[in-house]
Image (cartoon, coloured by chain):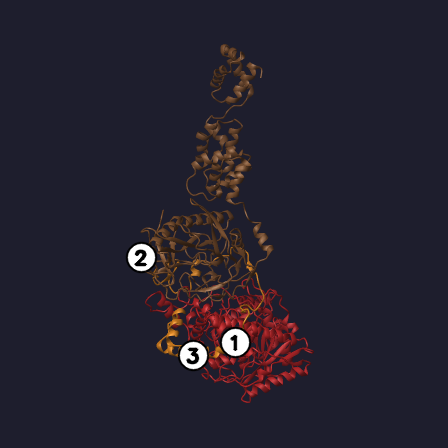
């Protein structure tokens, strides 16, 4: 791919933090609740009410910033960002202006071209706005304040990305990291992860570099949309530059919205004083100081990262790289399911095989929690243990018992018994039939005694046949061998 | 002096409709007040940290505990215009 | 002596002793309001039936032998800026003319907890912006000592209600002198506690870093009783101190011997009415006779307080009042062309002239290109002013001076000159900038019979000292026992 320009991409990512309640009041932050059912005087911005900071929100924010290797400020404060919009009930957003709680840091990304470090400018904690629904027919717009006041982490990168694929990798890496930390559920569809992109291009012509004006792209609702929007916008800027030759500084920063259906970015209406937010320190909140004790407390809540988990699966349990990757990349619920099977004394390799080959194959829809998987791990472990203790054939277990367990929710033991699939492992019963078969098939028995082990197959087959297939073949083999060869 | 143009610009920032008469009055009053507050320039404030909070209170948090929200009807009871369970506002253009 | 001439402390003793019921006390005040308020116009919302119901409930509780609160059965008038559940809280503004809060301000909850009777809601300058109560959208409250004059502001209704014996206690709010200045003009006691002493939850904000709620009464002892109820920690206000509340009503009687009282020479300079000056100086002499030591102190940056105040307060106000935009509550204009026009017309029609002026000033001083020169500069001077006070209070326990440069002025006298109006707060605004407590105590009258107030300030959380000094003054003067001669019906 050779473009006549170089793209510079900086991303502004907003993620909603996984708290029970809003940043400044005790209203729930549950997604999808009926309109205006999760509001109170504080998040409606009624006169006289005051915000009080959610401790968990701040700790989650610290956790995210620590793992992004940002420098945590020892002193931080909040500011008011003033602007009018119906989804912003106080007409100011409580955000952070000149003293964000974290600055710097970065993320390692990997694309086909290799590894790259993307630097961060800052990370800050602010409140979300509500939601406006615009009418298609030009009627009134409707305002729902359920989302107003939800804690939001803003992560701003340097314009270090030069390919749309890098933006994609950056978002995916960030998403995995935040999911690993349990800081956000990062659902772009639900808006708990949102991304705006600042894009411009550098064109080199006759030894001179021309930089097009930076455009902020909004309304991108998936990671692939981000990739497509940036590609389109870069080309559009290049073509615009060919036309008008305009470069950075000649006009204020423009905001364009991504139209996913048409695949283009469209200029958004300029707000005349859009940049004059009149920031000033929020007098209703007090500053926060962060010391080592708090940072240590937050560090203690760190969990194993996805990369660490993959390594552990390979090193400690001898899984293949492929299997380890599948278990971890399918989402934390799958890996947690795997760990649960191990806790239920299932051997790692069969746990991985069952989970990857059978459970996932039977699972439909999104997997967010363990209960989203087709079968409960305890029930599955009973099935695996039956196979392990030779009470059930592996094939029967996979083909017949598991599907029935999923459908009916009944236990493996009940189903196996009902289907008559239970393997009888009674040594006495096997020995009795084995003695009969040795008598009836004297020729084959003699061959075995003479050392021709191939002949034992016929004997085993006969014993199995007479048992109705209920004896474990290995046990039959073992008993016959012992009887004929003196074991 | 605080010109009528400056008044108009600030009024638009503050979403404040002013009549012609009010604009003239505002231009005069703000001019006088700003002239008065210019005396602050007599004070040497180099190296002085701005004081936003009087009390040395820091690190005040609440626990992440759910408190009851208002019933929808109570939340919307003061709304000047309501449509279903939403606040209703004139169409917002993108 | 009729019930309405008694102090709150006396009424509480009579109520506790069973000499009188809350219904009788409340009825006496309701009658007084009905007789006098058409002239004074202190009350915006007054419903005698509801007041008497509350009184009857307290009486029943008392008869049943239940434990009663510290203000059991005592009527209290409340400034219309304190949200009260289900009661019209208009802040003297058209823009909130029909606003019914679904919550109680912290101080309203405290009054309810202590079994007070919420007597009614009193007038104020719109959103507490003003020094004369002439900026109310609803009524022009009069000074009970001279009905041609303003009661001061913004808590003019609170001051006038007490001065006209229409309430034994009232609550005001003070952002730059709004409790102390009207107290001085109306000849009653008014206190602004330390910033953070009283929770601001439910107080409709004017300037959040300056606003405080304070008690108003005839006597310092009564103010102490009310402050004891209002003060204290509230987890809903992050700026509220968690420090314990002293028993002000008891410590108020501690002698003041050995206390050092600071005098700032510049406070007695030009612009001070000579009658005010001599009354204030006589009061300081009274305190000296009671064993206080008088020491000169300097507040070199105090002269910049008004300029600093009008930048800081209006900047915060421009943001605090941005929420009144006709979307979620309050007034919405009836005619507009689009969303932005709806905002502008709603605000243009809903706010009065002074509020608009301050929103404009505050918006300007925060706007791009001016923020550093005005807003940040003012915050720097604010620190210097506070440091001046901190240094002074290392040397003295209180600073004494006039509350206002003149006695109450006439209605309409300063409405067209905002700067002249602002200067009536010249002695009080620095207290708010520094976050310190201050109290206004009656200390005399002009020849024409207008009250004069003594202003006492202390360092952070020095309320006890202020109350002691104020009480000592009242123990040796009788200014607080005089009553305005209001015409009887």
Which quadrant would residue C140 be assigned to in this image? bottom left
Distance (Cα) linking label 2 and label 1 = 64 Å
Which quadrant is the C terminus of chain A positioned in? top right
Kindly identify the residue that appears in the image at 50 percent across and 10 percent down.
A442
Residue A270: image location, x then y, percent: 35, 63
Kindly report which numbered mark, 1 or 3, lies closer to the viewer in this rendering: 3
- Viewer-nearest residue: C37 or A58: A58
How crowded pointer 2 is (Cα within 10 Å; few <14, some 14-19, many 20+) is rated as few
Image height of C244 relative to A433, above or below: below
Residue B17: image location, x then y, percent: 37, 72
State yes or no: discs 2 and 1 in contact (Cβ < 8 Å).
no
The chain drawn in orange is B
Q: Colour of chain A?
A: brown
Tell me the tag on residue C178.
Answer: 1
Query: Does the rendering let one see residue C71?
Result: yes
The residue beneath circle 2 is A242
Distance (Cα) linking label 3 and label 2 = 51 Å
Residue C2: image location, x then y, percent: 57, 80
How crowded pointer 3 is (Cα within 10 Å; few <14, some 14-19, many 20+) is rated as many
Are the residues under badges 2 and 1 in a single subunit? Answer: no
- Left or right: residue C182 compared with residue A257: right
Query: Does the rendering let one see residue C23?
Result: no
Badge 1 element:
loop
Q: Colour of chain C?
A: red
Tell me the tag on residue B29.
Answer: 3
């Amino acid at each position: 791919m050779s473009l006549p320009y170089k793209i510079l991409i900086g991303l502004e990512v907003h993620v909603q933090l996984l708290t029970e309640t809003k940043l400044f009041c005790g209203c729930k932050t549950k997604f999808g609740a009926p309109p205006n059912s999760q509001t109170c005087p504080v998040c409606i911005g009624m006169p006289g009410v005051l915000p009080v900071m959610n401790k968990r929100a701040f700790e989650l924010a610290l956790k995210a910033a620590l793992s992004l290797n940002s420098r945590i400020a020892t002193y931080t404060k909040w500011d008011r960002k003033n602007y009018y919009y119906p989804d912003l009930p106080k007409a100011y957003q409580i955000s952070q202006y000149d003293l964000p709680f974290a600055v710097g840091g970065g993320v390692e990304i990997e694309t086909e071209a290799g590894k790259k470090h993307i630097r961060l400018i800052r990370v800050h904690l602010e409140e979300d706005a509500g939601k406006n629904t615009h009418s298609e027919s030009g009627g009134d717009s409707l305002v729902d304040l359920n989302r107003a006041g939800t804690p939001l982490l803003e992560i701003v990168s340097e314009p270090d990305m030069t390919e749309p694929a890098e933006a994609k990798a950056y978002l995916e890496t960030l998403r995995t990291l935040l999911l690993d930390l349990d800081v956000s559920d990062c659902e772009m569809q639900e808006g708990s992860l949102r991304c705006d992109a600042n894009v411009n291009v550098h064109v080199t012509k006759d030894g001179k570099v021309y930089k097009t004006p930076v455009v902020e792209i909004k309304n991108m609702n998936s990671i692939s949309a981000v990739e497509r929007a940036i590609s389109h916008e870069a080309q559009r800027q290049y073509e615009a530059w060919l036309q008008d030759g305009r470069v950075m500084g000649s006009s204020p920063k423009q905001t364009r919205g991504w139209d996913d259906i048409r695949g283009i970015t469209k200029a958004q209406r300029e707000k005349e004083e859009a940049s004059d937010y009149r920031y000033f320190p929020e007098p209703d909140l007090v500053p926060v100081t962060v010391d080592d004790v708090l940072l240590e407390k937050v560090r203690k809540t760190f969990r194993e990262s996805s990369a660490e988990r993959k390594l552990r699966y390979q090193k400690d349990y001898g899984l293949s790289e492929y299997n380890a990757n599948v278990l971890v990349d399918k989402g934390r619920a799958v890996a947690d399911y795997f760990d649960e099977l191990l806790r239920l004394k299932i051997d790692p390799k069969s746990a991985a095989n069952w989970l990857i080959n059978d459970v996932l194959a039977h699972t439909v829809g999104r997997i967010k929690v363990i209960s989203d998987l087709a079968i409960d791990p305890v029930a599955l472990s009973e099935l695996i243990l039956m196979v392990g203790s030779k009470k059930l054939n592996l094939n029967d277990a996979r083909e017949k018992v598991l599907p029935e367990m999923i459908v009916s929710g009944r236990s493996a033991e009940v189903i196996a018994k009902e289907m008559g699939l239970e393997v009888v492992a009674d040594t006495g019963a096997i020995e009795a039939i084995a003695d009969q078969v040795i008598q009836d098939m004297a020729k084959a028995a003699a061959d075995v005694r003479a050392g021709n082990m191939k002949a034992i197959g016929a004997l085993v087959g006969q014993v199995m046949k007479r048992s109705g297939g209920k004896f474990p073949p290995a046990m039959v083999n073992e008993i016959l061998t012992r009887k004929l060869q003196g074991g | 002096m605080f010109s009528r143009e400056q008044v108009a610009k600030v009024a638009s920032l503050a979403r404040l409709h002013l009549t012609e008469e009010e604009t003239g009055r505002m231009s005069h009053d703000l001019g006088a007040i700003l002239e008065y507050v210019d005396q602050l320039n007599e004070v040497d404030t180099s190296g002085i940290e701005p004081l936003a909070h009087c009390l040395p209170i820091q690190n005040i948090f609440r626990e992440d505990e759910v408190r009851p929200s208002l019933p929808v009807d109570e939340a919307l009871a003061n709304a000047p215009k309501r449509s279903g369970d939403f606040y209703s506002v004139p169409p917002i253009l993108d | 002596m009729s019930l309405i001439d008694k102090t709150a402390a006396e009424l509480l003793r009579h109520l506790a002793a069973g000499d009188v019921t809350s219904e009788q006390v409340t009825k006496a005040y309701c009658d007084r309001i009905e007789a006098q308020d058409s002239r004074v116009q202190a009350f915006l919302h007054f419903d005698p039936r509801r007041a008497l119901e509350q009184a009857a409930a307290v009486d029943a509780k008392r008869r049943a032998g239940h434990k009663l609160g510290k203000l059991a059965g005592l009527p209290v008038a409340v400034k219309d800026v304190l949200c009260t559940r289900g009661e019209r809280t208009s802040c003297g503004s058209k823009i909130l003319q029909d606003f019914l809060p679904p919550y109680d301000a912290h101080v309203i909850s405290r009054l309810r907890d202590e079994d007070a009777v919420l007597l009614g809601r009193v007038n104020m300058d719109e959103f507490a912006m003003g020094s004369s109560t002439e900026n109310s959208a609803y009524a022009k409250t009069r000074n009970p000592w001279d009905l041609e004059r303003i009661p001061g502001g913004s808590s003019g209704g609170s001051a006038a209600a007490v001065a006209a014996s229409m309430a034994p206690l009232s609550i005001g709010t003070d952002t730059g002198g709004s409790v102390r200045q009207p107290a001085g003009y109306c000849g009653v006691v008014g206190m602004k506690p330390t910033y953070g002493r009283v929770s601001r939850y439910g107080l409709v904000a004017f300037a959040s870093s300056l606003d405080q709620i304070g008690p108003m009464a005839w006597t310092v002892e009564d103010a102490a009783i009310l402050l004891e109820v209002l003060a204290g920690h509230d987890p809903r206000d992050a700026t509220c101190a968690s420090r314990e509340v002293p028993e002000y009503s008891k410590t108020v009687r501690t002698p003041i011997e050995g206390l050092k009282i600071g005098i700032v020479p510049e406070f007695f300079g030009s612009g001070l009415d000579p009658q005010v000056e001599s009354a204030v100086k006589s009061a300081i002499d009274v305190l000296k006779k009671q064993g206080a030591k008088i020491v000169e102190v300097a507040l070199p940056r105090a002269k910049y307080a008004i300029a600093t105040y009008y930048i800081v307060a209006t900047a915060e106000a421009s943001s605090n009042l941005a929420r009144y935009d006709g979307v979620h509550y309050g007034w919405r204009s009836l005619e507009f062309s689009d969303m932005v026009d709806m905002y502008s017309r709603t605000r243009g029609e809903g706010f009065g002239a002074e509020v608009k002026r301050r929103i404009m000033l505050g918006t300007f001083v925060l706007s791009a290109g001016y923020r550093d020169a005005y807003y940040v500069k003012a915050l720097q001077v604010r620190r210097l002013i506070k440091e001046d006070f901190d240094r002074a209070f290392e040397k003295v326990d209180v600073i004494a001076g006039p509350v206002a440069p003149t006695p109450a002025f006439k209605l309409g006298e300063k409405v067209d000159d905002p700067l002249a109006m602002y200067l009536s707060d010249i002695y009080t605004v620095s207290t708010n900038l520094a976050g310190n407590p201050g109290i206004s105590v009656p200390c005399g009258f002009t020849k024409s019979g207008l009250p004069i107030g003594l202003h006492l300030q202390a360092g952070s959380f020095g309320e006890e000292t202020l109350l002691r000094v104020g009480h000592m003054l009242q123990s040796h003067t009788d200014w607080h026992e005089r009553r305005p001669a209001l015409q009887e019906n």
